[in-house]
Amino acid sequence: MKPLCLIIFLSIVIQQSYLKLGADASSRDGFVRTKGVQFSLNGYPYYANGFNAYWLMYVASDPIQRPKISAAFQEASRHGLTVARTWAFSDGGYRPLQYSPGSYNEDMFQGLDFAIAEARRNGIKIILSFANNYVSFGGRKQYVDWARNQGRPVSSEDDFFTDSLVKDFYKNHIKAVLNRFNTFTKVQYKDDPTIMAWELMNEPRCPSDPTGRTIQAWITEMAAHVKSLDTNHLLEAGLEGFYCQSSPQSKTLNPPGQFGTDFIANNRIPGIDFVTAHSYPDEWFIDASEQFQMEFLNKWVDAHIQDAQNVLRKPIILAEFGKSTKKAGYSPAQRDLVFNTVYTKIYESAKRGGAAAGGLFWQLLGSGMDNFQDGYGIILGQSSSTVNVIAQQSRKLTLIRKIFARMINVEKWKRARGYGPVRKGASVSLLEKPVDKFLHEARIPNHVVSFDTNYQLRHLIDSGNLRDARQMFDKMPHRDVFSWTAIIQGYVAATNYNEALILFSAMHVDPRVSADTHALSVALKACGQSSNLSFGESLHAFAEKTSLLSSVYVGSALIDLYKRTGMIDKSCRVFTEMDFKNTVTWTTIITSLVHAGRHKEGLCYFTEMSRFRELPDTFTFAIALKACAGLRQLRYGQGIHTHVIVKGFGAVLCVANSLFTMYTECGEMQDALLLFESMIEKDVVSWTSLITAYSRIGQEENAVKTFLLMRNSEVSPNEQTFASMFAACASLSRLVWGEQLHGNVLSLGIVDSLSVINSMMKMYSTCGRLDSASVLFRGMRCRDIISWSTIIGGYSQGGFVDEGFEYFSWMRQSGTKPTDFALASLLSVSGNMAVLEQGRQVHALSLHLGLEQNPTIRSALITMYSKCGSIAEASKVFEETERAADIVALTAMTNGYAEHGKSKEAIDLFEKSLNVGFRPDTVTFISVLNACAHSGQLDVGFHYFNLMQERYNMSPAKEHYGCMVDLLCRAGRLSEAEKMINEMPCEKDDVVWTTLLRACTAKRDIERGRRAAERILELDPTSSIALVTLANIYSRTGKWKEAAIVRKSMKSKGVMKEPGWSSVLIKDKVSAFASGGQSHPQCEDIYSILELVVNRYDCAIKGAFESIQICDP
C-alpha cells in the first residue's frame, strides 16, 4: 500500500512540475530555434510580439542619453513585448559606426553593446540588421562610394550586390559585428542568446533587375557566409514581401513599382530560417481611400501567412507595419484598426499552430524623442488606445505559449507515467494542431482565449457607437479588465463621467476582475474632468493600498486630477513621492504649476528635469516657454530657444507658437516677427497670437491687416481670433469694422461663444453703442463673470450710474460673485458722478468679499473718495494699505491731494516714497507734476521733470509736457510755455494749446492767444473752446469787429458752446441738469418750481431796493 501511495504522490509532483515547466523554461535564456513553421525557445513555443527601434545604438552612443534606452526597454517589458529589431550599421556620415571599411567608432559600438545588455536585462530578444538599402545611415550608396574611391568602376547603387570589392567590405562588416565582444555583458555577439536573429539588409531592393535574380544570388552568397561564421543564431533576409516570377499569380498583390526581389524564391534559399513581410498601405497607396488601404492590408497579410505556411514551410514575422499620424484624415481609430487587423491575423494563425510567429510595429519611441518622430512613433509611456491593443496582443500570445507548453508537458507527463512512448516529433505535431482541441484536456476555459469580443467592443467604441457597445458589454458572459477598461474609457471620451465612475465601482466589486493601472488611470481622468475630488481621493487611497501608485500612468493621472481641482501642492506631493518619472510626468507637473500661475516653480521643475536625465519633449518646451512669457524672462526663454533649435523642434507648431508668445510678452516684437515669418506652417494659434500681440502694443491697425492676411490664407479664424479683433476695433473706435466682424461671427455660427460675445459687448460699449451691448447681453444663453463685468463697466464708464448699479444688482441676484473689475467700475462712476453714498456701499461690499486689499479696488476707492470730496477717507484707505509701495495706490493718493489743493501733502508723500526706495512710473510723475502746478511750485516741478529723465531714464510724454506748460502758464511765463510746446518731441494735441490759450485770456496776451487758438483750430476746426475763448479775448481788448467775425464763423459752422451741467443725488437716484435741458422726466414740474423761486427772488430784491432811502447830499 505504501509503495502505491508513494507512486501516486510522485506522479502528482512530477505532473505539477511539468505543468509549470512551460512558463519557466520558455523564460530562461537560450537561442531561439525554428521547429517546423514555428519558433522555439528551450523546446517551447516562442512568439515575437515586438517593435522596431532603429535608434538604439545611435542614442546609446551618448552615455548621457542611455537612461532613455533603459526606460524604453522597461516600458516594452511592462507591456509584454519580446523582440526588438534595430540597426547594427551606421556607415560614414555623422556619428558613424563604420568610418570607412574596417574602421570602427568605439563609442557607437559601445552604444550597441549597451542596447543589447539592456534588452537582456529586460528579457527582450534582439534582431540586428547589417546594412541599409537606403541612403540614411550610409546604406548601399556609402559602400559603393567607398569602392569608387578605391578605383572600382561602379556607377550604380545596385552594384552593391555584384561588385566583389563592395561584397568584401560587407562581409568584413558582418564578421566585425559577429565577433564583437560586448563590453557590458562580456559575451561575443555570435555567442549571445539575447540576439534572436541577424538580418542581411533592411528592405533590400534592386530595381535594375526586376527578375529578382541579382538579389537571389546575393542572398545565397551572404547567407552562406553568415552561417559559416555563426551557427547559433537565426537569419532572415529583411525582405518586404514583394512577389515576382516564382509566383506570377501573386504579383497582382504588389504595390506599384519595380523592386527586384522575389518573396518566394528569395526565402527558399538555404540558410534563411524565417521570412519577413512589411506593410505600409498608407505609404504605398497614398492617394487611395482608407477602405482600399484596409482591403489591401487584409489581402497582403493573408497571402504572406498562407505562403509561409503552405509554400515556404517557415515561420513568418510581420517585421514592419504601422499607421502614420501625418497622413491626411488620420485618426487614432484608424491606427487601432491597422494594429488590430495585423494582430488578429497573427493570433488566428498562432492559435491554430500556424506560421505567423509575431509582428514588430514601426516604431517604438521613448519620452523626449520627438526628433525621431516620423508619424509612426508610439510612446508606451503615454497611455493610448493603440498601446492597449499592443499590450492585449502580448497577453494573447503569452497565453497561447503557456497553453502549448502545457500541452507538451502533458505529453511528457504521460510518457513519465508510462502511458506508452511518445513518437518522435510529438511536440512539433502538437504545436501544429489548433489550441481549441486541447482546451478541454488542459482544463482551460474557452473564454480565456476568446479575445474577439473585446476587439469588437473596442471597435464599436472607437466608431462612436457607445450605445451598441454598452449593449454588447452587458451581454458578455465573461468580462476581463480589458472589457471593463474599454467601456469605461468610452464613457470618458463621451464626457459621461458619472457613468464611467459607476462602471469602475461595479468593476471594483466584481471578484473576478482586478483593476490594473490603465483602468485606474482612466477612472482618475474621469474624476479630474468632472472635478470629482472626493471620488478621486478614494481612488488615490485605493492605489496606495494596492501598490498601483508606483505606476507612472496612475501618478500622472493623480497629478492632473489635483491640478484640475486646484490642489497644486498635492500634485507636487504626489510627484515627489513617485518612484519612477518619465517625460510625461515631468510635463504634467510643470503644466500644473504654470497653469496655476506659479511660473517660477514651473521653471524650477523644468531645470530639475535635466538633472534626472529626462529630456523635454515638444510639450515640455512649450509649457516652459509659457512660464518664461509669464515671468517676462527673456534670457531664460532665449536659452530654451537654443535647446529647441539643437533638438530640431523649431518647426513643431506648438513650440514655435510658444516661442512667438514668449518674445512678444517680453517686448521683443522684432524677434517675434522674424520668427513668425520663418515659420513653415502657421495655424490659427500663430495668426491669433500675432493679432493679439499687435493689439497689446497699440498697433491695432497692423492687427487688422494681419487678420485680412489670415482670411486670405487657408487658415480659418476661431473664437479667440474674433475676440482679439473685436478688442482691436474697440481700441480704434471703429464701429463699422466691428459690425462687419459681427456679421462674420453670425455667418460662422460662433456667436454663442462666451469669449466672442463678451468682446463684442466691450466693442459696442467702447464705441458708445450701449443699447447694442445691452441687446447682446440680454440675449445670452449663459453668462460668466466677464459678461457681467463688461456690461457693468460699459454703463459705468459711460456715466450711466443707475443702469450700472441696476446690472450690478441683477448680477448679485443671479448668485455671481463680483470681481474686482466690476466693483472698480462702480467705484469709478461713483467718483465721476460724485455720489459718495453709493461709493461707500460698494466699499462695504468689497470689505464683505475680502477684496479691500486688491490693488485695483484700493486705488479705485482712493480715487472715488477724492473725487467725492472726502480726502480724509481717501487718505485712510491709503494708510490701511498692506503694501505701502503699491504704485497704483500711491499715484491715486498723490492725484487726490493735488486735486484738493493739498500740494504739500502730495509732494511730501512722493518724496517719502522715494526715500524708501520706491520706483515711480510715468503716471506717478504726472500726478506729482500736477500737484506742483496747482501749488505754483515752478522750481520743484522742473526738478521732478528733470529727475524722471536723468535718474529714471523715462522720456516725457505729452501729458508730462502738458503739466509743465500748465505750471509755466500759472507762473505767468507764457513765452516759455509757448516755446516748450513748440519744442515738444512728441505729438502736440489741443490740450496743451488750450492751456496756453486760457492763460493768454487771463493775462490778456492777445497775439499769443490768437496763435494758440489758430493751432487748436488746425487740429479741430470746430473747437468751441478755441472759438469762444478767442472771441472773448477780442471783446475784452475792445476789438469788437474781430470778435464779431469769430462769432459769425461759429454760427456759419454750426459750432455752439457746450453748456455746463450739474448733478444731484435724491433718493439713491442721480439727476443731471444742463442749461436749457428738457430730458428729465419731471422737467415741467422742475421748471415750474424754478420759475416760482425766481419770481420770489425778484420780489425780494425789488422790496430790498424800495426800502433803501436815497438821501441828497
Image (tube, helix red, strand yellow):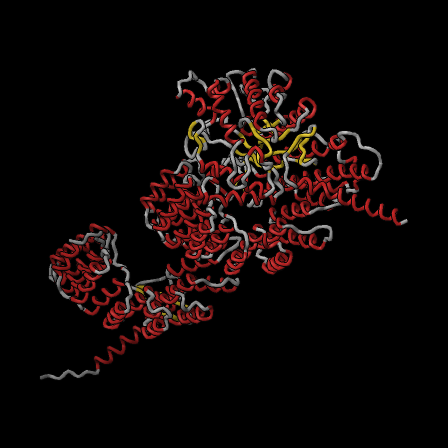
Residue at the left extreme, as displayed: 1113
Q: Does residue 822 show up? A: yes
Does residue 595 sit above or below 702 in this rendering? below
- Counting from the top left corner in percent of width and height, residue 241 is at 59, 24
Classify residue 520 as left or right of residue 776: right
- Counting from the top left corner in percent of width and height, residue 799 is at 37, 61
- Counting from the top left corner in percent of width and height, residue 759 is at 43, 51
Does residue 861 sit above or below 351 in this rendering? below
Does residue 824 sit above or below 496 in this rendering? below
Q: Residue at x 21, y 52 (%)?
A: 986
Q: Does residue 690 show up? A: no
Q: Quadrant of residue 964?
A: bottom left
The C terminus is located in which quarter? bottom left
- Counting from the top left corner in percent of width and height, residue 234 is at 61, 29
Of the pair 909 and 643, the residue shown nearer to us: 643
Classify residue 739 as left or right of residue 476: left
Of the pair 944 and 885, the residue shown nearer to us: 885
